[in-house]
Amino acid sequence: MLAIAKRSVLNILLMDDEKLILRALSRAFSDRGHQVFQASSSKDGLALYREHTFDVLLLDILMPEMSGPEMLKKITPTSASVVFISACVGEYNLGVVKSMGADLFIEKPFEDIFLVVEEIENLVKEKRQSFGDKI
Amino acid sequence: MSKQQLNSKAKLLSFASKILDQYSVENFLLTFYEEIPFTFKIKTVFLVYPCFTQSTSLSVVEASILKTFDVSDFSAFKNNDKIKDERRTIFAKFLARPMGRILDFDLLDDLDGQEKILEGATLFFEHDLEDKDINAFLEFLNKRKVVLGRTLKNILIENELKSDSMVWEQVFGSVSEPVVIADISGRVIRGNRCFYNRIYPYLDESDNDFISEWLQAYLRDVSNQIGQTWKSKTNIYEVHVYNLKEGGLSEIFVIYFRDMSQVYNLQIQLVQNEKMAAVGSLSDKISHELNNPLSGIKGMSQVLIKNKNTGDSVKADLCEVEKAVIRCEKVIRNLKDLSGNNLKDKTQVVSMSQLVSSTMALLKLVLNPFLVETSYVSQLDDLVEVVPELFRQVTFNLINNACQASIEGKKIIIRVQKNKNSVDLIVKDHGCGIDSTKISQIFEPFYTTKKKGLGTGLGLSMSQNIIKNFSGEILVESEIKKGSEFKVCLPLQKGLS
């Protein structure tokens, strides 16, 4: 109980056109007590972004109509941590996604979905710490 | 007839039979020298005669010893009084001593019953004769000049024939690709060394009468220029048959074998690589399409396995689902590895000019109908770091494309040039060109403008991938109906010096 109380609840926007990934990630984050909003298209994603405040944007890169990076361009600057996920491992890597304004790259298929959750929690924690240090 | 006349006649006959037996200029001269009566004080006999290599030979007999020299300047021996002294100088130079008096004597040849001076051959005598003896000596010579002239002429003609056939034999023998002369029944009349080394052993051990088959195929379609393909155990040849009689048929044929093994191997390799590129391009698409749902299935299984509400038996089922997904992932990974370039670590620092010129050698046939202009950088000044095999494939592809885009007789320029930091290969054709709206698509996999069967649409995309892997790029400029220029730029490597 103490551990949960210490850990902050994150508001997360999940965007992926693969419904099963949305549901799986959503469950994994919910199990850890986070608040998850799901979007299966960039249009839905943008609409949700405008309605809520998010700590994390977890965006699939290759989406029909508008790609993750394109959507990110429309909403920067943002205070949220940005994570891109993709199955196109050959084309994308951490360096590439950083140049597109993201903080983290996660490749599909994931080794273990709970490690993905942990990685994102750590990212937010580190980001907040360094932000705090600056203040 | 007096006894003296008879005697003289007998001497002449004996002389003729001796001299006619001689088959070389040297023996001819020696025999003649021996026959000169010692009463004539002849010190030295010189024979100047044309040599088959278009120079002049000088044979000298002195005290029964014969020497032969090559005389480069023949003009001094032409029948001209003014240069008599010059002859004396030349003889003196060869024998390295001062010359005495010289008498020259032309030989006669009878042509169609008419006696004519034998061109280019003259006898010279260094003598010590008194004037009355000179006349007797001239009479001695005059009686013999026809038989001498005729014999010498025959020897010279024979020499020339021998040397001609020797040159021909040498040329035929040293042709580095197999050539054979056969008659219409397929019997080998003559073959060159290469034929006996490389082709004959296979014909000999085979039950098939290949030569007859090639001749029959040729006779069925005489106009067929392409040639037949024949495989020995190790090589692939194009077999070309030629008839010796122009415009008609003789019973003698020349069969020439062009070794195509290297070209075929390169083509097979190219097709193989293009297939691999196809698999690669396809597997990229497939892996993306499959990895998405697989991530979902795997993630969801993992979530449900950890869920406290899930029963044990369902958990066990979900573990199997997860394992199945992992298996699928492995298959996809293997597919990608298979198509990936396993040659990538074999890079070498090599001269681009050297690579391009060695590839050109394989394209001789393809390039044959075009006007080809090449220029290279002096070797070892254009080093690039590549996998030689792969770079050669790129070169092959670009040149092949240029040929396919061009009409016969048009110019194709192949140039290697060195810049400050890069080495470029330029392949420029004057063919059909590429529409400016399509230029961005030409490097896409499966995009082709060629006729069905001529291209897979993977050559350029593969070439670009290869060059990108070596930190280079392929640039293209094209204008419709004017032609295209492809430029491969690779970073210049510093030499070992």
Image (cartoon, rainbow, N blue to C red):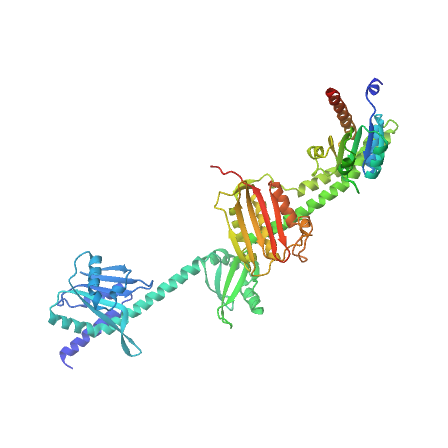
B472 and B77: which is toward the camera:
B472
Q: Where is residue B40 in the image (x, y as percent from the top left)?
A: 14, 67
A102 and B21: which is toward the camera:
A102
Query: At 51% from the left edge and 72% from the top edge, which residue is drawn?
Result: B247
Q: Position of residue B340 (x, y in %)?
A: 66, 42
Query: At 52% from the left edge and 59% from the top edge, which residue is drawn?
Result: B257
**Residue at the extreme top of the image, as rendered:** A2
- Number of numbered discs on residues: 0
Image height check: is A89 above or below B474?
above
- In the rendered image, the quadrant that contains the N terminus of chain B is bottom left
Q: Where is residue B487 in the image (x, y as percent from the top left)?
A: 59, 48
Q: In this view, does B26 lie to the left or right of A126?
A: left
- Rendered image quadrant of residue B298: top right
The answer to whether one can see residue A101 in this image is yes
Image height check: is B451 above or below B273?
below
**Residue at the extreme bottom of the image, as rendered:** B1
The answer to whether one can see residue B233 in this image is no
Q: Position of residue B138 (x, y in %)?
A: 17, 72
B152 and B115: which is toward the camera:
B115
Q: In this view, does B177 lie to the left or right of A66?
A: left
Image height check: is B30 above or below B4?
above
